[in-house]
């Protein structure tokens, strides 16, 4: 049996969590995806024994996959995690996928995120 924790969202099991960042600019909705093996994906992954909640899973995975540079190239992983945790605790826009037991937090961010170079992720 796996030692990965299972959390609950509205009575349903959560075994993975992630974040989809989006913003509105010039009348258009923009979503921030990662391109992995030719496919566009949100940022997230499976629960880990150290995680205490689905939010913690989404924060950890996002910080790992962006090197902590999600909001600024000058942030540490810790600072990025603090900001992201606060924002995710406040968001009410989530989507649940029953098949993968995946909880996706849809996080609206300021349009200024589009001005920051994506090269900050390495």
Image: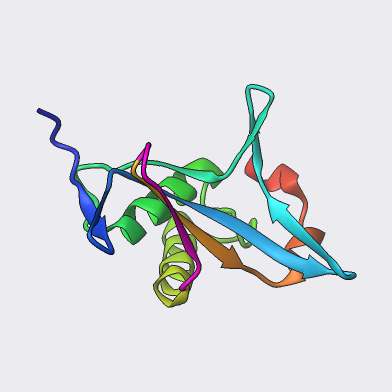
Snapshot quadrant of residue 24 = bottom right
Which of the image's four quarters has the C terminus? Answer: top right
In the image, 24: left or right of 3?
right
Residue that protrudes farthest toward the bottom in the picture? 90
Q: Which residue is drawn at 83% across and 68% down?
A: 25
**Magenta range:** 92-100
Q: Is residue 98 magenta?
A: yes
Where is residue 80? Give x, y as percent. Answer: 49, 62
Nearest the viewer among 63 and 101 is 101
Q: In this view, does 97 lie above or below 37?
A: below
Where is residue 12? Give x, y as percent. Answer: 26, 54
Which of the image's four quarters has the N terminus? Answer: top left
Q: How is the image coloured?
A: rainbow
Where is residue 90? Give x, y as percent. Answer: 44, 77
Q: Residue at x 69, y 24 (%)?
A: 38
Where is residue 6? Give x, y as percent. Answer: 20, 47
Residue that protrudes farthest toward the right in the picture? 26
In the image, 84: left or right of 50?
right
The number of numbered discs placed on residues in the rendered structure image is: 0
Snapshot quadrant of residue 72 = bottom right
Residue that protrudes farthest toward the left in the picture? 1
Q: Does the magenta stretch include residue 96?
A: yes
């Amino acid at each position: 049996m796996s030692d990965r924790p299972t959390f609950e969202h509205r009575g349903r099991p959560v075994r993975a969590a992630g974040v989809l960042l989006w913003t509105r600019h010039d009348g258009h909705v923009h979503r921030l995806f990662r391109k992995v093996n030719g496919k566009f994906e949100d940022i997230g992954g499976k629960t880990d024994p150290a995680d205490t909640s689905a939010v913690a899973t989404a924060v950890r995975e996002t910080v790992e996959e962006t090197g902590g540079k999600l909001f600024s190239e000058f942030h540490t992983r810790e600072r990025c995690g603090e900001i992201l945790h606060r924002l995710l605790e406040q968001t009410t826009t989530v989507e649940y996928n029953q098949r993968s037991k995946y909880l996706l937090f849809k996080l609206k961010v300021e349009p200024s995120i589009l001005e920051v170079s994506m090269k900050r992720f390495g």
